[in-house]
Amino acid sequence: MADPSTYRPAPGSIPEQPGVYKFRDAAKRVIYVGKAKSLRSRLNSYFADLAGLHPRTRQMVTTAASVEWTVVGTEVEALQLEYNWIKEFDPRFNVRYRDDKTYPVLAVTMNEEFPRLHVYRGPRKKGVRYFGPYAHAWAIRETLDLLLRVFPARTCSAGVFRRHTQIGRPCLLGYIDKCSAPCVGKVTAEQHRSIVEDFCDFLAGRTDVMMRRLEKEMAEAADQLEFERAARLRDDLDALRRAMEKQAVVLGDGTDADVVAFAHDELEAAVQVFHVRGGRVRGQRGWVIDKVEEMGVRDLVDQFLSQFYGEQAELAEQIVNEGTPVPREVLVPELPTDADALSEWLSDLRGSRVQLRVPQRGDKRALAETVRRNAEEAFQQHKLRRAGDLTARSAALAELQEQLGLDSAPLRIECIDISHIQGSDVVASLVVFEDGVARKSEYRRFALREAATEGDVASIAEVVRRRFHRYLKENAADEPTPGIDPETGRPRKFAYPPNLLVVDGAGPQATAAADVLAELGITDIAVIGLAKRLEEVWLPADPDPVILPRTSESLYLLQRVRDEAHRFAIRYHRQKRSKRVQVSALDGVPGLGQTRRAALIKHFGSVKKLRAAGVEEIAQVPGVGMRTAEAVVAALQGEKGQGERES
């Protein structure tokens, strides 16, 4: 544990201007980023008596080994720089309000020839429009079921779409008029896209225009005695009204606003956001985060708005037709101290004036109370769930320290696993857990030599050697900033060593890993092997394993780390194997090298489709001439004929 007084800046050396500061640990990794109106006042607060600091702040300043700062001209510049640095360095003591990956959304794949409507969870992708998030996936499906009557767009997966295109018959939805059946050519790509765009306009809030248009068409159909069409339009109107009823009007003046509320205690905070567009609640998000330092509601508002809208603005730039994610109003429980700077920054993101205010009366005040109650309920549920998790993780790390005789708790654990089939496509994974939680951004994978037929022991040794050779190289004393990339200022890929290295296997694997570390001169990393059969823990060169209690939190943590490494290795192995199997049918074709094989597979999607293609179609692939195409067809037809003879 570092003493903050050892790196405290000299009195009077810190400027009083606004700026952004970074704390770095002993390995030069940025662990915290903050902003301040007065850098001197703010930074001096971190070097007060440790006993009086917030627990997380105390942990941060004792983990840090240095502090640096950058002076800026205005508070708006400080907001932008702080957001950029948090995004770039991903400091472990900063809270990141990333998009919630558990709430389902309605996705519209505008980047496809025939856009698809479907329920989606996960990170946003370029060229896809998103509506929501919704509280439950069934709510999306229920809304879709109502709206497909009016907007019969495609909802099937790519595989189902291709299959019905091949057989020339639509699916059930096509027969009951809940899909316009573009798979069999009932509508053109342009007509189908028009249907999807109308659907998006309706969900985006342009409901009145759609309703008036349908009412006008219904009246015209009735005047022309087209009663069946008029009845159909009447039913469409009823479906739209039922869909609109599910999005209750909460603000009658067509308000465009986000309503934010918090619930918090000394260590954690919950935030809830209701997205109101056109007076209707169009979506809801929620997070629960650890508080890094003593923070009131004003500070929470400041931190949340800068990170959330910065992230949303970047996402909107990548997605076509997404529009601005910043509403005309942001309603908060308390105004932050730099409310004017925040409002100016949000206005720049939106491109027009954004009002940041506290609702005082009426419907907006009532809605803010509803959001606050949601935040309190979410916070309470989180505390009930997480009480066991935090206790279990702390107990697991403490148990490992005691049971393995370590000098300190293994706050960073790395695990290596090997995957192959009879010595082919040998790959390895390296996963990282910090504070008992997976840190997926630091996962690494290795493709091992095909000649590595000596077995898993030799493969483990190779991975350990490659991983820690990079570690020594990136932290070499002759580097200007050991462990840090001078171009980006970010930590290098292998810059940080683990406290505990786990290898999947028994004594020989653990001994091989320890021997490599000793060979490289690394003596401060503990090594163990975890055998799958009896879940035994093996120490290097020990004849007998360490048996951890079957119900202990320490064994459960090691199992999770090992299973995650196994999952990651299997995934990489399958990727490599599938690529090799795909192109194996093309091996030996004259004039067809690796680059052209890859181009053919990419163009046709699979060997099966390539086999069905003709010579002229294959010759159209860039880099493949007529002679090579003839050779490909001859090879694939010969393979097919041989398979038929064998059968």
Image (cartoon, rainbow, N blue to C red):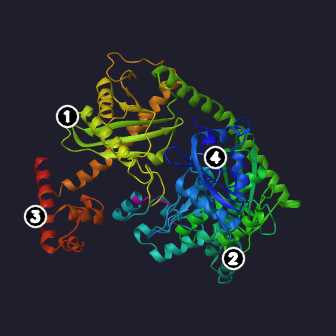
In the image, what residue occupies the spot 57% across and 58% down?
A: 85
Kindly report the distance in space between the C-alpha atoms of the residues bearing marks 4 and 3.
70 Å
Residue that mark 3 sits on: 590
- The reply to whether dot 1 and dot 2 touch (C-beta < 8 Å) is no
Residue that mark 4 sits on: 8
Instruction: Give the mark nearest the N terminus, 1 or 3.
Output: 1
Single out the mark in the foreground, 3 or 2.
3
Quadrant housing the N terminus:
top right
Residue 577 position in % (x across, y down):
27, 48
Element assignment for label 2? helix
- The reply to whether dot 4 and dot 3 touch (C-beta < 8 Å) is no
Instruction: Give 333 or 292, whichever is nearer the viewer.
Output: 292
Residue 253 position in % (x across, y down):
81, 69
Single out the mark in the foreground, 1 or 4.
4
Residue that mark 1 sits on: 454
In the image, what residue occupies the spot 38% across and 47% down?
A: 476
Q: Mark 4 Cα within 10 Å, few/some/many (few <14, many 20+)? A: some
Q: Is residue 262 visible?
A: yes
Element assignment for label 4? loop
Residue that mark 2 sits on: 209
